[in-house]
Image (tube, rainbow, N blue to C red):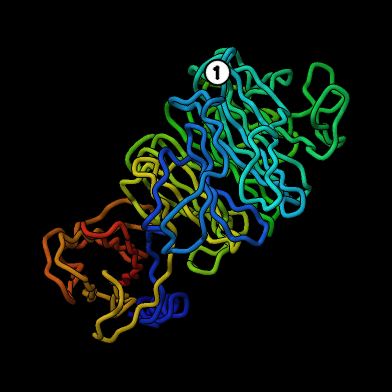
Amino acid sequence: MKKWIYLFIAVFFIFGCDHNKAQLKIELAFPNIEVDYPVDIQNAGDGSDRIFVVSQPGIIYAFENKRDVNSKKVFLDISDKVLFGGEQGLLGLAFHPDFKSNGEFFVNYTTDNPRRTVVSRFRTDDTHSEALKSSEEILLEIQQPYSNHNGGQIIFCRDGYLYISTGDGGSAGDPQNNAQNLNSLLGKILRIDVDKKDEGKNYSIPEDNPFVNIPDARGEIYAYGLRNVWRFSYDPETNLLWAADVGQNKWEEIDLIEKGKNYGWRIMEGFHCYNPSNNCDTSGLTMPVWEYGHNEEGGWSITGGYVYRGKDAGELEGKYIYADFVSGNIWSLELNDGSVVNKLLFDTDYAISTFGIDEGSELYFANYSNGRIYKFKGLPVSVGESKIPFDMQLKQNYPNPFNGSTIIDYYLGKGSRVSMKLYNITGREIAKLVDEYKTEGWHRYVFDTANLGSNFSSGVYFYRFTTHFMADEMVGKMVFVK
């Protein structure tokens, strides 16, 4: 009994007993906006607070960052230049840190004859409202031996340099061993200075790049041994560069990119030997900070995200938010005194192709399947029974922590089929709590652990609430103590 009391006190101080605790949800950020094949979300950092969405066939759209915005404007259309299909297309957008004054931005796309990746600079008109297509200045071209694994992300970091992700060239298993070849720009993170020009180039190579003046190595290379970093991002508060590297047959991985490091592909896939499949030489290789397997609890194609620094979803502060394109799972990953804490936030049906942030650091993601843009929101939850101005609502269960049974109240703005599932802290589904049609109004579910048997153990659990009439999802956290 004394042990139980101590555990209850510890949980009480960790989680509190405040029924006004926020609940994380997903909501449509711009209900009236759709973009075909969205693959990148950016802001210009110029104070205009515009949202820019890259459409893979070759168009960049811009619109106001307002929930009720009902129109989007073509910012740039280079669809006649872009080779689109599969993993090819217009893949990345980055605005110059001084865009407000110089109107410069950069894109990454694939084209043909021959098939290659192009990184270009464009400029805008005097008002910065529209790109000047004729202003294109090609900085870098990389031959692509296969149609897949084109990388595509381009970003600026605090040092003012442009970082570029390149895939290993494609096919399967990196047949040309590009990722380990320092004389190839494929399978790398590149770093260039767009404000200077070396002889014969429309950019310069920073003098402190790790392979400058190294025989048989390209000076543009910042890090190597990567398979296909589709999305990577920079966290200015920690100065960390987060990269999500798409795996081969078994493992997806997350890397913290550092200058000059070798991240192992094709010697390794995640923490595991790939070529050779056993007893590979790992000396000099930098391991991932996280990996997940190819299954429903993980996924099959990782989509890198951002460390959350916004205000709308305080539960996510300081955590790296990422997803899987195939499974629709969304996780948070947190580095904590040398340990890594990974938590499943949502298991969605979305094909999450990219994340992006606005000028206020709020986090968005795109659903490739329907062209919609979503964001995260923490909603305050009250105990009262008054009707709320939301179409759906999930209350914090009470009591919490609990022993035996606890009550979960939820509200529907209209009748709908409702799903509520329970997950453990590793993201594994434990039980279906609700799966039936419910009428408009408040409903109550009494969760009794006796229904799950004596093996149901003490710990933290999550319950996910969805309806068929809204795209929004809500997740609550409960603590069970024996």
User: Can you tell which quarter of the image residue 412 is in?
Assistant: bottom left
Q: What percent of the width, then of the height, locates residue 467?
A: 22, 60
Q: Quadrant of the C terminus?
A: bottom left
Rendered residue at 38%/76% (across/down): 3
User: Can you tell which quarter of the image residue 481 is in?
Assistant: bottom left
Q: What percent of the width, then of the height, locates residue 122?
A: 68, 38
Residue 369 is left or right of residue 57, and the answer is: left
Residue 17 is left or right of residue 403, and the answer is: right
Q: In the image shown, does 376 or 21 lie closer to the viewer?
A: 376
Q: In the image shown, does 245 or 292 lie closer to the viewer?
A: 245
Rendered residue at 25%/85% (across/down): 386
Q: In the image shown, does 277 or 67 lie closer to the viewer?
A: 67
Rendered residue at 53%/50% (across/down): 62
Q: Which residue corresponds to mark 1?
A: 174
Q: What percent of the width, then of the height, locates residue 158?
A: 75, 51
User: Can you tell which quarter of the image residue 254 is in?
Assistant: top right
Placement of 369 over or under 467, stated as above or below: above
Residue 423 is left or right of residue 418, and the answer is: right
Amino acid at dot 1: Asp
Q: Quadrant of the N terminus?
A: bottom left
Rendered residue at 32%/60% (across/down): 472
Placement of 414 over or under 236, stated as above or below: below
Label 1: how many residues lie within 10 Å, few (<14), some (14-19) or many (20+)?
A: many
Q: How many marks?
A: 1
Q: Secondary structure at mark 1?
A: loop
Q: What percent of the width, then of the height, locates residue 40?
A: 52, 43
